[in-house]
Image (tube, helix red, strand yellow):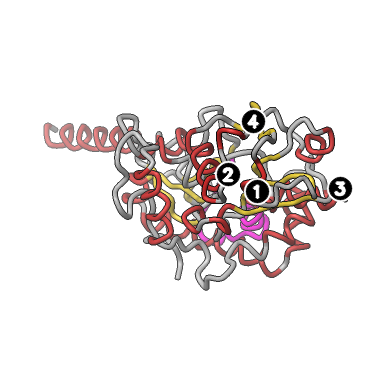
């Protein structure tokens, strides 16, 4: 009887530990492993492959039930870092505070959703802002973020301009087309695959320069899939199965942009149909771009950006080489 009681107690303790660790083997009624994925924003074409994988049954075929959730104000990093979701969407620049310093959490990038940085500065055509120096004396809509302003400062000064002459206006932009047309601001930092495409659809003639074209150090990874490091180490097969299914979703979107756009609209019908279609056509060429392996993160490019962060003292502490990402869970 004593041995039986000891065995029952031991099993109870083990079960309690597993539950306390966030449940490493959560199953639904069909025996599929439950995984949560938190977005960075409302559903858009950065996320299309995720919804394709849901719709086409790629996750289900991999033995997974994936719950897609919206981010809280704290962002996806907090949700993934506390293992409330095992995966989510972040960006190499904005995830930095979550991986270094006293408040560092166990998260790392495990795949990139877009192979190259498609962000840059957009302005009305002919206003002289087709190059960074042209921002002198113009109103730029800023989020007042250290990395953002350091990036803009470098490209302006490298082009021979004076960053001190750029008028930094607190950003209240929710519609880039209206903001430019009304001249509320002169220049806006945008991701071209969404806001840039929106200006084209509106028939608005614009000038645009991409940060990566000004300096390769700004060809960092944005957006990326992040995962909970501790959970992935304990569940490597599940992590790999998730990314394999996600890859299939994005590769379908690459090959079938029109059908993929329709799938996204099914899950996010509040979006503008024409914008989704045009944005999907643009991004389907950018998901993998010039690499053969979906999601691959080039260590040299990753390190180059964080080395720039270190040189400009934009992090609480020095970011080590090859820190904050892994390709270990990616399918070949």
Q: Which residue is mark 1?
A: 191
In this view of the protein, can residue 110 be seen by the observer? Answer: yes
The magenta stretch is 48-68
Q: Is residue 59 visible?
A: no
The image's mark for residue 161 is 2
**From the viewer's perspective, is 62 left or right of 237?**
right
Describe the element under mark 4 as helix, strand or loop.
strand
Q: Residue 249 lies in what quarter of the image?
A: bottom right
Q: Which residue is mark 3?
A: 202
Q: Position of residue 260 (x, y in %)?
A: 72, 59
Where residue 232 appears, as percent x and y from the top left, is: 37, 50
Q: Nearer the viewer, residue 152 or 49?
A: 152
Classify mark 1: helix, strand or loop. Answer: strand
* Earlier sequence position, callout 3 versus callout 2: 2
Disc 2 is placed on an element classified as loop
Quarter where residue 21 is shown: top left
Report the residue marked by disc 4: 167
Compared across the picture, whether 182 is left or right of 117 comes to right
Contact flag, marks 1 and 3 (Cβ < 8 Å): no
């Amino acid at each position: 009887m004593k041995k039986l009681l000891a065995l029952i107690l031991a099993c109870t303790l083990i079960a309690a530990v597993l539950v306390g660790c966030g449940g490493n083997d959560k199953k639904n009624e069909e025996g599929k492993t439950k995984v949560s994925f938190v977005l960075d924003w409302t559903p858009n074409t950065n996320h299309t492959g995720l919804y394709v994988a849901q719709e086409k049954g790629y996750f289900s075929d991999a033995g997974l039930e994936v719950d897609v959730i919206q981010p809280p104000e704290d962002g996806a990093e907090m949700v993934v870092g506390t293992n409330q979701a095992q995966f989510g969407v972040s960006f190499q620049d904005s995830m930095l505070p979550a991986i270094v310093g006293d408040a560092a959490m166990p998260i790392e990038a495990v795949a990139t959703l877009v192979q190259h940085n498609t962000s840059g500065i957009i302005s009305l055509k002919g206003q002289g802002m087709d190059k960074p120096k042209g921002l002198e004396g113009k109103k730029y809509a800023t989020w007042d973020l250290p990395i953002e302003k350091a990036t803009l400062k470098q490209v302006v000064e490298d082009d021979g301009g004076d960053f001190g002459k750029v008028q930094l206006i607190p950003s209240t932009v929710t519609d880039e087309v209206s903001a430019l047309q009304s001249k509320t601001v002169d220049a806006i930092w945008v991701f071209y695959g969404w806001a840039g495409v929106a200006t084209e659809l509106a028939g608005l003639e614009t000038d645009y320069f991409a940060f990566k074209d000004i300096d390769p150090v700004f060809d960092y990874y944005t957006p990326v899939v992040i995962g909970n490091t501790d959970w992935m180490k304990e569940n490597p097969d599940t992590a790999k199965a998730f990314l394999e299914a996600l890859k299939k979703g994005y590769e379908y979107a690459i090959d079938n942009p029109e059908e993929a756009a329709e799938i996204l609209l099914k899950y996010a019908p509040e979006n503008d149909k024409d914008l989704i279609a045009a944005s999907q056509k643009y991004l389907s060429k950018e998901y993998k771009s010039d690499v053969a392996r979906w999601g691959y993160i080039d260590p040299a490019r990753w390190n180059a950006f964080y080395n720039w962060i270190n040189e400009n003292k934009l992090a609480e502490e020095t970011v080590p080489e090859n820190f904050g990402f892994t390709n270990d869970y990616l399918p070949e």
